[in-house]
Image (tube, rainbow, N blue to C red):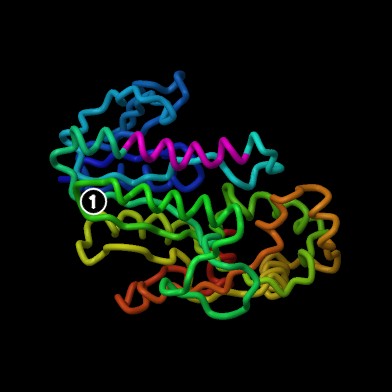
Amino acid sequence: MKNVLVTGGTGFVGEKIVAMLNARMDIGNVYVTTRNANINGKKNGKVTYCLWNPLTENTPDIPLSEIHSVINLMGENIASGRWSEERKKRIYNSRIIGTKNLISFLNKEATSLESFISTSAIGIYEPNTNELIDENTPVDQDSWLASVCIDWEKTLDELQRGRKVILRVGVVLDGNGGAIEKMKLPFLMGVGGILGDGKQFMSWIHRDDLSELYITSIFDENFSGVYNAVAPEPVTNTSFTKILGSVINRPTIFPVPSFVLKTLFGDMSSVLLDGHRVIPQRLKEMNYRFHYPHLTLALEEIF
């Protein structure tokens, strides 16, 4: 029985992971850190919610010496608004400073720690190259988003215990949040369409597959180092749009020009307009099986 600590466990991906952990017979206690005082101390089966602000040096009220694994999902949502300088600072600090503080506590107290599963993003790679990107592809040295990912990954160098795994996550698809929630209404109304020129690649993963990947990384000791957490079938935005329109039986004839997105979202528009043709090469080499390897399967499950 493994006791697991989850940071960011009340977010879009974290919620699913926590639910899956709660249902497993081989999991003991699950501790979820939260900044929401209203759910501090709340219990749900094996899950206990514990108040903690990761930007402070206060130790979370969790029996760290009993923790076997950590799933680290902390960080402010990068796609929920324009990237002002203040917001960039919050996005950065919520990941890097928060993770450093957590690792400091773990180094002192987590004597049973076996694994630390952390998060990064495919935004660490150079965008719009149209070349296949695997885990050996050099990271981008120029963009702000890549710099956040690079510094976030480096925080694990300070961890003194346990196996370290980093999942570089692509666009996460599910019907109850994330990218699909933002685009669902316009598409259902028949006014969804291609973003920019539509040539940018989208490397995606179904939320169920991603959640299972985090949990598998806890139990499978073969997991170590960096993995691209994406399905094996990256598609262009044009292809994504056509497949989505076909699945929900709606027209996709209203493109959104790049200048409109840049006007609306500023630098954050790069999340929509920059593409990464990423493949999960290391997972392929491990013969890892996805429930939703193809986009049509994923979208049919969602809709």
Position above or below: 110 against 174: above
Q: Which residue is nearer to you in this view: 46 or 141?
A: 141
Which image quadrant is residue 219 in?
bottom left
- Say how many tags the image has: 1
Amino acid on which the number 1 mark rests in the picture: Ser
Q: Position of residue 148 (x, y in %)?
A: 52, 50
| 210 sits left or right of 82 in the view | left
- Residue 101 covered by magenta stretch: yes
Which image quadrant is residue 222 in?
bottom left
What's drawn in magenta, residue-wise?
88-102
| 68 sits left or right of 100 in the view | left
Q: Position of residue 197 (x, y in %)?
A: 79, 71
As drawn, the residue found furthest toward the front would be: 141
Does dot 1 land on a helix, a strand or a loop?
strand
Q: Position of residue 158 (x, y in %)?
A: 29, 46
State the residue at coordinates (40%, 76%): 281
State the residue at coordinates (38%, 65%): 227
**Which corner quadrant holds the C terminus?**
bottom right
Q: Which residue is nearer to you in this view: 173 or 246?
A: 173
Pointer 1 residue: 115
**Which corner quadrant holds the N terminus?**
top left
Q: Which residue is nearer to you in this view: 189 or 70?
A: 70
State the residue at coordinates (37%, 31%): 33
What is the magenta segment's predominant secondary structure?
A: helix
Q: Position of residue 23 (x, y in %)?
A: 30, 46
State the residue at coordinates (67%, 64%): 274
Dot 1 surroundings within 10 Å: few (below 14), some, or many (20 or more)?
Answer: many
Position above or below: 145 against 236: above
